Image (spheres, rainbow, N blue to C red):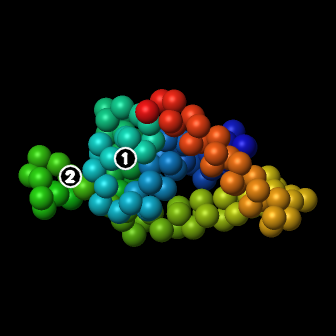
Amino acid sequence: MRKMFDASVGEIGITRSQWTTIAVVAGKPGATQREIAEVLEMSEASAGRVIDRLCADGMLERRPKADDRRAHSVWLTPAAAPVLEKLSDLATGHEATVFAGMDTAEIDTLERLLCKVYANVTERRG
């Protein structure tokens, strides 16, 4: 599923690390580089390189963090809005493809079961 989505997103000139970073910042505005790295399960250095690139492209900006002079928070810029809209449209289309032929009850059951699997995996890592 991810490969299929990445191929579609690649057509708009965004890599997996870029679209996932944009998505994290959209869901958690003002997150620090460390928080973004944790969500994406990557090193802070790797997250920093992606953030630097997206800042250079004008999609993200770093702002000083009010409660920690050493840290910066990361925010979307207005230039990210069209990209987010395209990502949303692509995601909606992919969801329709992935869940084709399934009714709401089946999707709810699948989600519940996948949540159990996730809980089992994260408890073992913990």
Residue 78 coordinates in the image, percent (x, y): 39, 69
Residue 24 coordinates in the image, percent (x, y): 44, 54
Residue occupying image coordinates x 61% and y 64%: 88
**Which mark is on residue 36?**
1
Q: Nearer the viewer, residue 36 or 102?
A: 102
Mark toward the start of the polypeptide (2 vs 1): 1
Residue 68 coordinates in the image, percent (x, y): 12, 53
Q: Residue 10 falls in which quadrant of the image?
A: top right
- As measured in the structure, the alpha-carbon distance from the residue carrying label 2 to the one carrying label 1 is 12 Å
**Which mark is on residue 72?**
2
Residue 70 coordinates in the image, percent (x, y): 11, 46
Q: Residue 40 falls in which quadrant of the image?
A: top left
Q: What residue type is labelled 1?
A: Ile
**Which mark is on residue 125?**
none
Residue occupying image coordinates x 53% and y 61%: 83
Badge 2 crowding class, 10 Å Cα cut-off, few under 14, some 14 to 19, many 20 or more, is some
Residue occupying image coordinates x 29% and y 42%: 34
> Which image quarter is the N terminus in?
top right
Residue at the left extreme? 69
